[in-house]
């Protein structure tokens, strides 16, 4: 379902008017606001410009933040959370941290499919994701996604770069 969603967004690149709007700062703020309304005070720090970013990067970042904040609500209700979206070079960087309990077992839902799903989403987009307890307490998710989409071609020695237009 997630891959289909990303493909639908990617197919819109050549269209004049996208059928599905890409996530922007307002969409990320809505996630932070919904998390605050659920009882976890959440702050968004927006330090990125997604103009020209691949649709996959924007949607991937949105889904990672969405899953991360869902985990905070489920497993660290008595905490605060901060979401930072920034661009560093050619990477879109996503950080979601909370100051709740730092035991990793509290952040794994069953087999850990939420965290594994986020890692897989980042990998598919050509990025990386790390998640785990923080030394200063709480839990953090850190993702780096290419602002341009790199797709591995099994017949080539490296990724093929697809630039957003």
Image: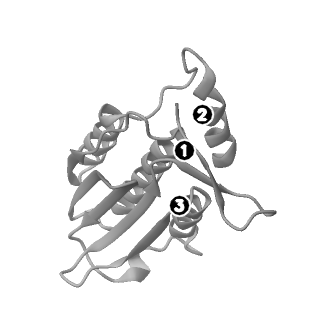
Residue that label 3 marks:
122
Which residue shows up at 55% across the image and 21% down it?
18
**Within the image, what quadrant is residue 143 found in?**
bottom left
How would you rate the neighbour count of disc 1 (Cα within 10 Å): few for under 14, some for 14-19, many for 20 or more? many
How would you rate the neighbour count of disc 2 (Cα within 10 Å): few for under 14, some for 14-19, many for 20 or more? many
Q: Is residue 24 left or right of residue 157?
A: left
Judge whether 12 appears above or below 110 on screen: above
Q: Earlier in the sequence, mark 1 or mark 2?
A: 2
Q: Is residue 49 left or right of residue 2?
A: left
Picture coordinates of residue 123, whole percent (x, y): 57, 64
Residue located farthest toward the top when viewing the structure as drawn: 16
Q: Secondary structure at mark 2?
A: helix
Residue that label 2 marks:
9
Residue that label 1 marks:
56
Mark 1 and mark 2 in contact? Answer it, CB < 8 Å: yes
Q: Nearer the viewer, residue 71 or 29?
A: 29
Between the residue at mark 1 and the residue at mark 3, the CA separation in whole angstroms equals: 10 Å
Task: Count numbered badges in the picture.
Answer: 3
Residue located farthest toward the front when viewing the structure as drawn: 157
Judge whether 165 appears above or below 98 on screen: above
For the N terminus, the image quarter is top right
Picture coordinates of residue 141, whole percent (x, y): 37, 67
């Amino acid at each position: 379902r997630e891959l289909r969603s990303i493909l639908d967004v990617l197919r819109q690149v050549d269209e004049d008017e996208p059928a599905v709007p890409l996530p922007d700062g307002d969409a990320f703020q809505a996630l932070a606001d919904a998390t605050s309304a659920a009882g976890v005070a959440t702050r968004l720090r927006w330090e990125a410009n997604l103009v020209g970013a691949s649709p996959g990067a924007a949607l991937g970042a949105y889904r990672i933040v969405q899953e991360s904040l869902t985990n905070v609500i489920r497993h660290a209700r008595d905490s605060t959370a901060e979401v930072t979206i920034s661009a560093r070079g050619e990477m879109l960087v996503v950080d979601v941290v909370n100051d709740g309990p730092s035991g990793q077992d509290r952040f794994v839902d069953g087999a850990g499919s939420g965290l594994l799903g986020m890692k897989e989403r980042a990998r598919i987009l050509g990025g990386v994701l790390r998640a785990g307890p923080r030394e200063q307490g709480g839990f953090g998710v850190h993702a780096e996604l290419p602002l341009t989409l790199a797709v591995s071609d099994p017949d080539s020695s490296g990724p093929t770069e697809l630039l957003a237009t």
